Amino acid sequence: MTYQTTNTANHDGPDTVSVRGVRVGYTDRGAGCPVLFIHGHPFDRTMWDPQVKALAGRGYRTIVPDLRGYGRSTVVPGITFLDSFARDLAALLDHLGLDVVNVVGLSMGGQVALEMYRLFPDRIDSLALVATNPLPETEEGRASRRRLADRFRKEGMRGYADEMLVGMMTAENVHDLPEVADHVRSMMYASPPEGAAAAQLGRAERPDHVPLLKRISAPTLLMVGRHDGFTPPEGAELMHVRIPDSIVEIIEGAGHLPNLERPERFNELLRRFLERARTRTRAL
């Protein structure tokens, strides 16, 4: 198990690399213990800006990509399954010369993190799953995601973004944190409709990750906002009883995006967890 702690990426902006037939935009900042951040839908890598600022240059190397179909990465029409995202990220790690990383994923990004663990368990030293649902999609949910994909292609993202802002964040935080709300809204507005649609269709067919949970040997942090209506705290508790080495942290005053709604608390918990994982790696 080795970490490459050096960073040769452009510190002033995003870099891009061609992997598996697509261009992936990413930032690679800091040096030290590597942490891969996986964004949710319909966002991009900038959703992790508060975490990059908190960790990069403080003993951590932060690798923050745009998933295919989002941000600066290639938009691929059709359907994008979770394993495609996971294999893209593994190829990015190959490009960066990283054998093993700590992985942080939120919502859809957490599902991608679970898929990475299913496919490449030896490459993941620790997992932080934020607002993550490991269950397979229901029949009703599949139909809803297919309707959403059709809507994105026909109407674009603005209407959906306006409807979903309260929900992604609590109503109180939308009011009290206008700069954060503007950032969340802007990311949703900018999300490429075809890429978002492809991801929705892929998530409609997502695998059941519940049987995987008991096989996760990596230390796992389960974080969720107290007021998350999409992935309520009881879902994190469900995962906690199945993942052997796991802890649950419920972030007060946050909805579905605790890393943006309560960044100081989120960063404190994440740093504490990563230090524990790093100590464990040194001992091994």
Image (cartoon, rainbow, N blue to C red):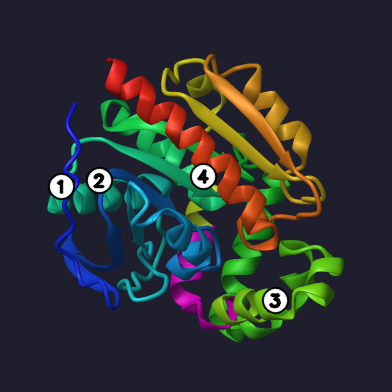
- Quadrant housing residue 237: top right
Q: Which residue is located at x 53 percent, y 68 percent?
A: 43
Q: Which residue is located at x 33 percent, y 32 percent?
A: 124
Query: Residue 56 or 88: which is nearer the viewer?
Result: 56
**Label 2 Cα neighbours within 10 Å, binned few <14 / some 14-19 / many ≥20:** many
Task: Between label 3 and label 1, give the one nearer the viewer.
Answer: 3
- Quadrant housing residue 233: top right
- The residue segment tinted magenta is 188-200
Which labelled disc corresponds to residue 90? 2
Q: Using the numbered discs, state the Cα–Cα distance from disc 3 to disc 1 in whole angstroms.
A: 35 Å
- Quadrant housing residue 226: top right
Q: Amino acid at mark 3?
A: Ala
Q: Which residue is mark 4?
A: 110
Q: Are marks 2 and 4 in contact (CB under 8 Å)?
A: no
Q: Earlier in the sequence, mark 4 or mark 3?
A: 4
Q: Earlier in the sequence, mark 3 or mark 1?
A: 1
Q: Which residue is located at x 57 percent, y 68 percent?
A: 149
**Quadrant where the C terminus lies?**
top left
Query: Residue 152 or 15: which is nearer the viewer?
Result: 15
Q: Which residue is mark 1?
A: 94
Q: Are marks 4 and 1 in contact (CB under 8 Å)?
A: no
- Residue 130 location in percent, x, y? 59, 44
Helix, strand or loop for disc 2:
helix
- Residue 272 location in percent, x, y? 53, 36
Q: Using the numbered discs, state the Cα–Cα distance from disc 2 to disc 4 in whole angstroms.
A: 15 Å
Q: Which residue is mark 3?
A: 181
